[in-house]
């Protein structure tokens, strides 16, 4: 038998009342309860940390490109029609 563990948190990013939120989720999958738990979790932590850094860097890049292009929620292609 193998197990999965999932946890997530949504938190406010902007000023109070700004309706700017972010969410972070982490899932550790295929944990083998017949093997020592700590080595499995250590590998999971390392992988989750590296993946989060890569995703955050990509997100930051895409946000920067959006701002550089002058696209804002008020000027989005859908709002222009």
Image (cartoon, grey):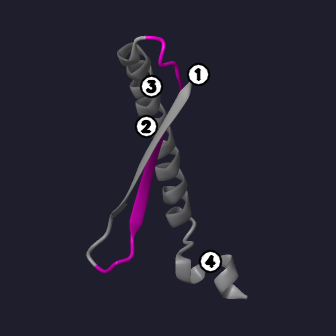
Q: Secondary structure at mark 4?
A: loop
- Between disc 1 and disc 2, the foreground one is 1
How far is mark 2 from mark 3, CA to CA? 14 Å
Q: Secondary structure at mark 2?
A: helix
Q: Which residue is mark 1?
A: 1
Of the two numbered discs 4 and 1 on the same chain, state the one appearing first in sequence.
1
Q: Mark 4–mark 2 contact, CB under 8 Å?
A: no
- Between disc 3 and disc 4, the foreground one is 3
Per the rendered image, the range of residues in magenta is 17-35
Q: Is residue 71 above or below residue 39?
A: below
How far is mark 3 from mark 4, CA to CA? 38 Å
Residue 76 - label = 4
Of the two numbered discs 4 and 2 on the same chain, state the one appearing first in sequence.
2
Q: Residues within 10 Å of mark 2 (few under 14, many from 20)?
A: few
How far is mark 1 from mark 2, CA to CA? 31 Å
Q: Is residue 17 above or below residue 54?
A: below
Q: Is residue 71 above or below residue 42?
A: below
């Amino acid at each position: 038998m193998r197990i999965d563990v999932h946890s997530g948190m949504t938190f406010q990013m902007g000023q109070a009342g700004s309706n700017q939120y972010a969410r972070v989720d982490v899932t550790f999958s295929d944990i083998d309860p017949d093997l020592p738990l700590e080595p499995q979790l250590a590998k999971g932590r390392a992988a989750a940390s590296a993946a989060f850094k890569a995703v955050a860097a990509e997100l930051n890049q895409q946000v920067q490109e959006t701002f550089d292009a002058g696209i804002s929620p008020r000027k989005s292609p859908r709002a222009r029609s």
